[in-house]
Every structure is written in C-alpha cells, then in structure tokens.
Amino acid sequence: MKNITLENQFKKLSVDILIFVGFIAIISSLSLVYFHIKEIEPNILPEIHKKTEAVGHSLVKQLERALDLGIPLDQFKGMNLVFKSIMNNNKDIASMGILNLDEKTLYQNDPPSTSGVGSAEVAESENEENILYSTFPVMFDKNKQATLKIGVDKQYVTRSINSIIYDIATILAISLLIAAEVIFFFMRISLSGPIESLMHLIKGVKDKHIVFLNNKIPRDEIGSLMKKVNAYLLNFSSILEQGKLKFEKATKLQKNSSEFSRLNKRIDEIRSSYVFDKRNIDSKEITIDPRNIRTPIFLFIFCETLTISFLPTYGSQLYTPLWGIPKEILASAPVSIFMLAFAFFTPLTGYISDRRGTKKTFILGTLISVIGYFMCSFAETMTSLIIARAISAIGYAFAFTASQALLASCKKANSKVDTASIFLFAFGSATLCGAPVGGILADNIGYQSTFILSGIFSALSAAVVYKYIPEFSVPKDKVVASSFSFKKLLRLLKDPLFSSVLFLCALPARIMFGGFLFFLAPLYLLYLGNNQSTIGRVTMIYGLTLYITSPLISNLLKKKLPPLLCAVLGSVLIGLSAGGIMYFRNTLGVIISIALFALGHIMQMSSSMNIIFNYSNSKNPDIGKTTVISVYNSIERYGAVIGPLLMGLCISLYSYVQAVAIVGLISLVSSVMMILLYLVGRKNVLAHT
C-alpha cells in the first residue's frame, strides 16, 4: 500500500467537503426550483391574459382616437412600427393585426426572421397552432369598424420556465466552481500550508537537518503549535551549544581528565550531527505558495468577465451621434478604449511595483477598478461610459500585471508547480464563471447593478490579497538590475522569431479576441433574438474550453508537441473559427466559432509564451525576461484595440457574417505565414526550446 502524502490527504479532505457542500446546494436548489415552478406555472398564463387585455385596450383607444380625428381606417401609417414597438416590449405577444368587417387583414406585424429555417409561410403555419388569439373591437360612433387581433404564444410560458431552469442550473454549476476555489484556498491558507511547514520542521529533526520557521507565523491553533515546536528546537540547539561551551571550559581546567574529554567529544559528535539552519527566523524574504494567489486572480478577472456578454449592448443603448461616427464603430469604443488603456498603462506597472511593492500595486489596481465599475454603473452617455472604461482598464492593467509578477516571484527552480498553468487556470475558470453570470444578472437586475457587483467583487479580491498574501520582497543582493531602452526594443524586434510570433501569431489572435469574442459575438447573438442570459451562456463556451483544455495543452507542450507547431495549429484554428458563423448563421454557429477560437487561442497563448521566454531570452540574455514579457504583452494588447474598431467598421459596411469572415481571413493569412515560418525555422527554434 502506497503512503499517502500530506498534500494528497488535504486534497482528499477538500474534495470531500466540496462534495458535501455540492450535495446540499444541489438538493436545496432543485427543491426550491420544483416548488416555485409548481406555484408559478398555474398563475403565469392568467397574468399574461391580463397584460394582453391592457395592451389591447390601450391600442384600441389610440385607434379610436385616430378615427375620431377623421383618419380613414385604411390610411393609418406606421402601424408596423407600432406593432414592432409593442412586441419588443412584450415578448409573449407573437402576432398583432387589424381586420376589417369582412375579416380581411388590413395591417399585420412583420413576420420574424427565418433565415436558415425555411420560408415565412412555413414558419407561420408551424407556429399558428401555438398562438392563442384575443380580439378587441374598434368602435366609431357606436358602430364596430374593425377588429384588433392579438396572438399570445402558448409556448412562451414553457420557454420562460425553461430559461429560468437553465439560469438556475448555470448559477448552480458556477457557484460550485466558486465554492471549490474558495474551499481549496482556505484549506491551503489555514490547514495544509501551515501543517506542511510544521511537518517539514519535524521531518528535519528525523533527518538531523533542522530548518527553522520564519517568525511570521499565523496566530491560530496550528500557528501556536508551530511556535512551540520552533521554540523547543531552538532551545535544544542552544542547550547543545551551551553544553559544548561548558565542557570545553571544564576540559581546559582539568586537562588530564579523560572523563571530561570523552564527554566533550560525545557532545561535539551530537552537536555536529545536527544542522541548525536559522536563516529563516529573522529573514525578510517570504516564501509564497503560488496556488494561494490563484483565488484573488480568479476573483479579479471574474469581475471584468461579468461585463463580456452585455457591454456592447449597453454601449449601443447609450449611443448618441458623435462627430459623425457610425453607430457600429462608436459602439465598439468602450471595448477598444479599455484595451488601449490596458496596453498603454501595462509598462507603468513595473515602475510602480519596484517602488511600492507588487502586493500594493495589485491592491491599487483593484481599487482603481472599483471606481471605474461604479462610474460605468452611473454612466448616462457614451462619453462617460468610455471614460469609465478607461479608468477600469488602468486598474485592470495594474492588477493583471501585478498578479503575473506575484506568480513569477513565487517560482522556484526546483518547484514542481507550474505558475503559468496556475494563471491560465485562474483566467479560464474566471471567464467560464463570469460571462454567463454577467448575462443572467444583466437580464434580471439590470446593467447598472451588475457593474456595482463587479466593483464589490473587485474590492473583495483586494481584501483577500491584503489579508492573506504577504508582500514578497527580494533581498537587494539578489535583485537583477535591468533597464529598458529603445536599443533593446529594436534588438528584440529584429529577432525574426520574436517578431514573427508576435505579429503573425499573437497580434491576429488578439484582433480576433477583441473583435469577435468581446464585440461581434454578443451583438450577433442579440440580433438573432437571444436574451442576455443566453448570450452569457454562449459566451461561457470560451471559458469552458480554456478550463478543460489548458491542462491538456500544457502536458502536450511538456511531452510531445513542439511549441512552434502548437502555435501554428492554434493560428489555423483561430482563422477557421469564423467558419462556424459563416456556415450555420445561427446560435449554433456562434457556439462552434467560440469553441474553435478558444481552443486555438489557448494553444497559441501557451506555445507563444513558451517560445518568447526561452528562445528570445536565450539569444538576448542581457535584455532580461521582464523586459521581454512587457514588450510582448504591450504590443500584443494593441491587437485587442484594433479588433473591435475593425469589426465595427466592417459591420457598418457589410453584414455580421461578412465582418467575421474578413477578420477570420486575416487570421488565416497570418497562419499560412506561420506555417512557412515553422517549415523554415523549426530546427533552430527546437534547439533553443
């Protein structure tokens, strides 16, 4: 039977707690759903009838008023617009029309779009059985002149209840993921981390190599035990030291005493057999488990991803004509400005972090983001929304880069923990949770309240870092001095592999990322008739794909797949992802496109960073890895600035499908060039990676 390590025991305990919490959450949620639906379902149809009567009587009064003004019944103008406005505000109404005394239709609402389904006649005949009609007489001089006919969709109740069930199921699944993240975090902070340190100390006694704990020990019960064990071992080392000194003194007084010499020799053997390493006791250098940083990173990115599914729609609603800019381009401005400010302020993070500390930089970034989110909530114009998003981006740039720096500071040469995979996992799980929750919240409590919740969660991530993550400090003798200069930038850009991976792989991927995932996909899904909850669930596919595939891609890169080949395959998938929308032209096509894009993006991100960090840094070691990272990240982010603007321009000139085809073509062309790069330079690259 294999010995179970302490870490595995805590993992098992954490999983058991999570299963218990999940079981309670599922049972309670299903019970609430069952009882509420049983109570709501019989009452919702009568309420719909009441609302239909209110709409019908209100419209009849307007029609009768027009007849009183002398407007002939057959000369009403703009009835289709009136019907459209009413039906947009009342989703349960499926049909509206006005019939004359001969039961002939004078006015009828425009038929719904049926692209990819069939002809309008077929759709109407299929839906006729699912419509329940109500009629309202239109009177003039006490004589009936026409009949207003309003049809209510019988399936609306079923669809509404199903939507509620889907929302609850999504929230339940995501709440379990968040619960898992929180449980594992507190298990590591409160139990597994301290006990692992204590066991390491006790194991040192067995191996006769004692490495004492740092004085900064938690004040809980385990911390109290750690202090006592640390104190006992320190006392033991001092007793041996004092005994050695006493016997040396006694031996000097009685030089001919063989007994004293023998005892002194024995104590010297005991003392020399133990190694007492006291460097950690008063050391200011703090070791941080990188897994503890994953939770605040998750919380912070979760705040921003809450807005993915509805930000373009929110921007469109605040649109007012500005400098003659088309609506489609101006609606992309909040996304583009966010990405631009993010890219511009990212290099400043290193400057602030060097002077104020990485932890303080992260907290500063989250607090700036809180201000930005609250400003977004109270924005009343497109200009105020753009300013608010720029402020949010400044905070996001500080916190995002500081979180990467915290992880990089935790990385040790002999550590088995992959900090890059920790960051990708936190990013993927936060995107997975944030997008659908944001859509559901926007659909039920509104855009403004969702922004406020983003600010609250952002403040919570700052509180977690402030409370549980110590400030990482590196001794001055270990700090590697590095400075940025334009000569170093030019040397990096002259490196053919660095420039090729950056401009042919990373930049097109970011253009597609900002233009497709953050801008076009939510607008196109809304155009297809989906509500914000559905848009959030569809956008969730990106995070779900990252969540599932990131460990697989990481293992492939470690074992079999060359990084440059992985980057090439990722670029090809990103280019082909536009095919889902182009071929299907419905919600399923968007799902396929997002899944393909997410798979290509995770392959491209993982492999590109691997190539950049190893190959370019080995060719230019004097530049420094930090400079390489900042240059790569800054230039890459400008792709996310170009993406929404380019997509908005294409939408203003062409259709949604044509716009995504153009951007997808850019990615495909760059992927072809990446294939040529792979065929030409793979041997040189593989030698360095």
Image (cartoon, rainbow, N blue to C red):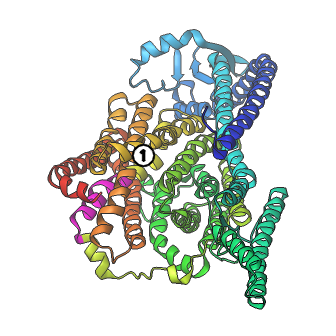
> Which residue extends farthest bottom?
253
Where residue 389 sits, quadrant-wise, is bottom right
Q: Is residue 280 visible?
A: yes
Residue 497 among those drawn in magenta: yes
Left or right of residue 163, residue 641 in this image: left
User: Which residue in the structure is indicated by mark 1?
Assistant: 554
Q: Is residue 263 left or right of residue 547?
A: right
- Quarter of the image containing the N terminus? top right
Name the residue at 31% across, 78% down.
488
Q: Tell me which amino acid carries mark 1.
A: Ser
Quadrant the C terminus occupies: bottom left
Span of residues in magenta: 494-511
Magenta-colored segment: predominant secondary structure:
helix
Residue 330 drawn at (x, y percent): 45, 57
Image position of 516 with respect to 141: above or below? below
Residue 661 position, x and y percent, is 30, 42
Crowd rating for badge 1 (residues with CA inside 10 Å; few <14, some 14–19, many 20+)? some
